[in-house]
Image (spheres, rainbow, N blue to C red):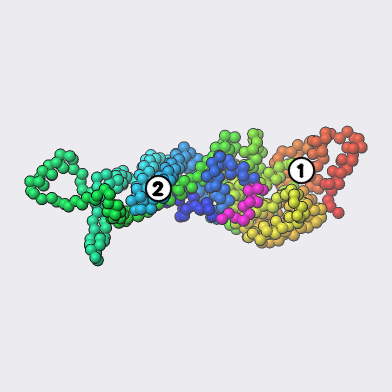
Amino acid sequence: MKAYLMFPDRDFDPKKPLPPQAPLLVKDLELEVLFAAMAAGDPFLLDIVSPGVLIGLDTPEGIRYRQDVMRDCIEHGRIVRELYALAVEALERERKVWGWSTIRTSPEASLHRSREVLEVFFDVLGRLRRLAESHAASFRSAAFSRLFKLLVAELNEDYLAEVADHLELLHFQDQLVMSARLGESNEGVYYVLRRPPYRRSWWERLRNRHTRKARGRSPSYTLEIHPRDEQGFRALSDLRGQGLDRVANALAQSADHLLAFFRMLRTELAFFIGALNLHDRLVAKGERTCFPEALPFGASRLTIRSLRDIALSLNVADALVGNDLEGDEKLLIVITGANRGGKSTFLRSLGQAQLMTQCGLFVCAESFRANLCRGVLTHFKREEDATMTSGKLDEELHRMSALVDQAERDSMLLCNESFASTNEREGSEIARQVVTALLEEGIKVLYVTHMYELAHGLSVKGMPSALFLRAERLPDGTRTFRIRVGEPLETSYGEDLYRRVFGRPTGGATDARARSILTEMEAPGP
């Protein structure tokens, strides 16, 4: 049996290698906050949701398949959690059986262990079937419909009763019956375990004994082994082992098959349980979510309504400001504007939404439509190297070189203040050359920068595939944290920060000197 909740035609492999850029994505997009909310303190969930999010799907059909499963999970969260709890229970009970029998290797010990495991599994499977039978009609996704249909069809009451009967017989409470033939040198061959005869009542057994005495013959021969005959008992044990070997192997294979089913069911449900945990957190906070529309590789598409940063939302109590964007046919999106205006937050929210779209989950927005990307890459500014083994610009260049090697057509690169560690003229020229080369290769670039020379230089080119956004600032200096369409400005309004820290200028020499310094910092490079 297969669950097929993550993919329509294969199992989910959480051990699959992560993309090479995964550590940078987790750090730059603050995905550790997202994963922690999904795991809710469960280490197993954490091990599953991380690769589940970072290893995306590559077809719109696969994304829609998983989205349909997620819709069912949101609508029937209690039932899905019951399914997950049953899978966990089966594995926990199996582990306890396995714990004391691993050292036993004889056919009889293997049969004993497999029989107990199957009894555990079929008890849980019976409850799974009853749960599926009760709620199958409420689920709409192809994945859950197929799973429930499988459970109801293959685990009907007659089948479960027959399995229970066979497992009861394998306890051998009365006797072990097997047949054999004589081979070469009169050695026993073709040992086959037989079904025990009908167990007669004490009255039937008593009547049968008197009947045999009356007829004067016995229907069988009995060989008794002396209690101190160790060789005899060893030989008898070998005979039992040969008779039980085939049955023990068959039971072990059945137990392993069901064990694999429960493990995969738990693994695949764990991803959706993590997503449910995250959804519950967002809904409790009043955030809106939606299922994004994923479009094929190729033409650049990006249309959003009220997109918000999930990691930030999980860390603050206040409601966040959502942002809109019409970015269809745009390969380059440059974001400039006032300091602390929400530019980096907006960039992170775009990266998070792209990853969640491609892993088949919801996004924190009213609507989101985007084309698939073959990889999401990030190049965010870093703090100074504490080891002093290289300068900041050197570190940035090496990191960008590695990203360029990984990038392929239809990838997305998110840059946050890249190459701002040198002077504006040099940084702008380096960034311009990198961005131009990436665009020529069909790679989408989203760039947050304070470098006016870079932003203005790209703007005056008049590229139809470029879009320029600006963090909104009201005339009184208030940041609205909204990102609007707007050409780059020469200033990032650093004086607003000065006023916030030191108060309004009083006209003294110190304030005049501070304004002069701020003006020099915001002026274009030589």
Residue 20: say if magenta.
Answer: yes
Q: Where is residue 34 in the image (x, y as percent from the top left)?
A: 60, 43
The residue tagged with tag 1: helix, strand or loop?
A: loop
Q: What stretch is highlighted in magenta?
A: 17-29
Residue 328 visible somewhere in the drawing: no
Give residue 234's quadrant in the image.
bottom left
* Amino acid type at image mark 2: Ser
Residue at the outermost right position: 509
Residue 39 visible somewhere in the drawing: yes
Left or right of residue 210: residue 475: right
Q: Mark 1 points at which residue?
A: 338
Name the one closer to the observer, 518 or 129.
129
Left or right of residue 461: residue 174: left
Name the one closer to the observer, 351 or 92.
92
- The quadrant in which the C terminus is found is bottom right
Q: In this view, does 251 lie above or below 120?
A: below
